[in-house]
Image: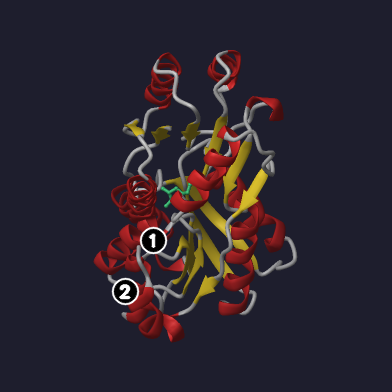
Amino acid sequence: IGYSQIGAESEWRAANTISIKETAEKLGVELRFMDAQQKQENQIEAVRKLIIQKVDVIGLSPIVETGWEEVFREAKDAGIPIILVDRRAAVPQDLYVSYLGSDFLEEGRNAARVMAKLVEGQANIVELVGTIDSAPANDRFTGFREILKDYPGMQIIASQSGDFTRARGKEVMAGFLQTYGNTITALYAHNDDMALGAIQAIEEYGLKPGVDITIVSVDAARGAFEAMIAGKLNATVECNPLLGPQFFELALKVVNGETIPKWVPSIETIFFPEDAIEILPTRTY
Ligand code: AHR
């Protein structure tokens, strides 16, 4: 099995990589794992290499949605099925066998629903967007706004990409604070890493994260639970990275010629500070 991973931008991604590698080892599957170090061109090259190596199935987590059609056609012409893992690609449906991953739109909607409750419908929100043109950033952006339409007292006053990393999250939040200062009352971060970086920026600015600024993020990684226990994060919407077992199950079915669903959604929930102490020891990522 070949696998093209995005890189190592977040706690989530690290857990996702471990899940893929550990499951392959457990199952005795020969895994050709390629890390694209955050570059689409490296992912395209990886897919081409895997085609030459004649792997049975290619797993791919596409960094962005667009720009895949040509290489997907090459895989199809070579008779190698592609399973999209974690992120979708904007290609015709006949170019991949299945998408295994989250409902990012619903994650965005849930983040807005939770935020609306926490701020009682009144907020000046800044938004840390994920990697530009990635499926989770696109959908978390759209889903959040869908719900916000029903809350006229909640406005997004600034929105910028923090590329899903802690360092960029901190940097962009520092910029928001410089421009908008304490008129900011809420932060929506498309992942926990950016929220954790932003928390540092808020503290350095002299405000209390989770108190002066209500913060909702996505992933539910361990770092988010620690921040909730410390009272610095108000909620995290789960996005499950432990996709290894489901991926290899799907890959095996494909190899055996079985039909598999076009979309296998992950099962996810929302976590709040009041449950964080109890839940943290059970979190594996
Ligand atoms: O595609 C899933 C997203 O990618 C996660 O929310 C984020 O943390 C990761 O980097």
Residue 168 position within the rendered picture, expressed as x and y whole percent measured from the top left = 33, 47
Q: Secondary structure at mark 1?
A: helix
Query: What's the CA distance linking mark 1 and mark 2?
Result: 12 Å
Relative to 50, say whether 137 is above or below: below
Is residue 174 in view from this perspective?
yes
- Badge number at residue 226: 2
**Extreme residue toward the right, this view:** 150
Is residue 231 in view from this perspective?
no
Residue 256 position within the rendered picture, expressed as x and y whole percent measured from the top left = 59, 35
- The residue singled out by tag 1 in the image is 195
Relative to 162, say whether 72 is above or below: above
User: Which residue is painted at 34% across and 81% down in the image?
Assistant: 229
Q: If you read the primary sequence from the N terminus, does the residue marked by circle 1 or circle 2 appear first? A: 1
Rendered image quadrant of residue 80: top right
Relative to 101, say whether 239 is above or below: below
Rendered image quadrant of residue 81: top right
Rendered image quadrant of residue 266: bottom right
Relative to 279, say whether 250 is above or below: above
Instruction: Decide which of 222, 212 is in the foreground and name it.
Output: 222
Q: Secondary structure at mark 2?
A: helix
Please state, as top left, top right, bottom left or bottom right, where the C terminus lies in the image. bottom left
Going by the numbered disc 1, the residue's amino acid type is Ala
User: Which residue is painted at 65% across and 27% down in the image?
Assistant: 91
Pointers 1 and 2 in contact (C-beta within 8 Å) = no
Going by the numbered disc 2, the residue's amino acid type is Glu
User: Which residue is painted at 34% across and 67% down in the image?
Assistant: 222
